[in-house]
Image (tube, helix red, strand yellow):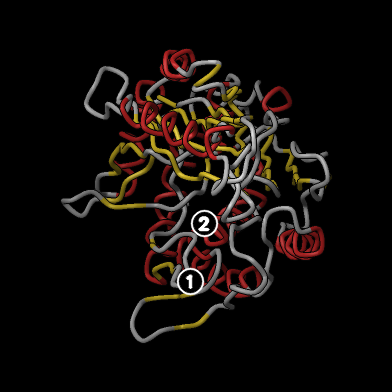
Amino acid sequence: MIDAAPRMALAAERELEALVGVSSPSGDLDGAEECVALATAFMPTEAAVERLECSTPGHARDLVGWLRGSGERRVLLLGHLDTVVSHEAHRPLRRDDGDRLTGSGTVDMKGGVALSLGLMRELAARPELFDEAAILLVNDEEWRTASFAHTERFAGFDACLCFEAGERTKDGDEAVIVKRKAAATLHVQAHGRSSHSGSAPEKGRSALLALATVAQLVAAHCDPTGPDRLTAVPTILRSGDAFNVVPPSGELLCDLRADRLGAFDPLLEAIPAEHDEVSLEPSMVRAWPGMDSRAATAEVLAAASEALGSPIAAAERGGASDASHMAAGGIELTLDGLGPRGGGAHTPHEWVSAESLRTRAEVALAVTAALLGA
């Protein structure tokens, strides 16, 4: 299968340009529908196409493509079409001097989507390799706080390949992701009492000061070298509407990462219900499980490395991904980071390496061949 990589890479660059040409910030219906239409057009003609309700209410429905074969194994390809980039900040694809393809969503993760669609076309030409092959492209990965809706539907699949951005090791070997941290967003609401900040500040109870105290408490729990490798970082504090009023309300958001979701419980319990007569209401508005598929994927990576003729390393990443939901939902053999290499995710200079479209296609094809016994 690996000899299909140049063909996949050529198509991926063209399809990446089309996908990046559409501004699709998470939650935007028109942008999502346009991306879904493009992805549908890039599906193999043999694929049956279905739309599934998105995990997040009000978002465009997610896209699934299905292939039926005569083999034994079932494999899922996974990705997302939404970005964090607003319409105003969107940049279409630009071919810079050298190797860079720059544009909004290139690395996170329309480059990976383009490669996964190419892999679906290659699988369509080899139906004897699989019983069922599916591709799931969701429209809410970047800002989802609801529970992931699709784990049960695909829980019986033999493998999941997610096409978030790829990487190399320090030694230059191609790598895929087999371990991810759990991730959560802590939200704390504060309710105090307003007063004139000049004539009667003592009558007020400042939500801002209470939340600042909580932010320090959260930061004090950060322990990246501890047993759970917990990071706890206050990221947003909103409070106050006027310069001369003691702020009566506000909210604090914190980003939490650890090897397991349970590591966040002591931090949540440490936040008091009240501080200086300001009531505090903490909650987790987003909780994504961790992923550890090192044992389940070791044999496949060894076989894929042999087929490729060079090592495919097992790597770890702190960022969250829908691959973690699939792994937690029952697909033990879950691999992530199969997309092209690049950088600058979520920034105006986001880019992918044009050369890596071919090398990462080789990795994806080698892994798929190892999974399916090709």
Q: Furthest residue to the left?
A: 171
Residue 171 to residue 344: above or below = above
Residue 236 to residue 72: above or below = below
Marks 2 and 1, the one that precedes in the sequence: 2
Q: Residue at x 59, y 64 (%)?
A: 85
In the picture, the disc for residue 348 is: 1
Residue 351 to residue 254: above or below = below
Q: Residue 158 in the image: state x and y as whole percent.
A: 57, 25
Residue 29 to residue 20: above or below = above
Q: Residue at x 70, y 63 (%)?
A: 42
From the viewer's perspective, is 356 left or right of 374?
A: left
Image-quadrant location for residue 146: top right
Q: Residue at x 75, y 39 (%)?
A: 56
On the question of residue 4 being in view, the answer is: no
- Of 125 and 252, nearer the camera is 252
Q: At label 2, which amino acid type do we have?
A: Asp
The residue identified by callout 2 is: 108
Q: Residue 115 in the image: state x and y as whole percent.
A: 54, 58
In the picture, the disc for residue 329 is: none
Q: Residue 53 in the image: state x and y as whole percent.
A: 83, 39
Local crowd at mark 1 within 10 Å, few (<14), some, or many (≥20)?
some
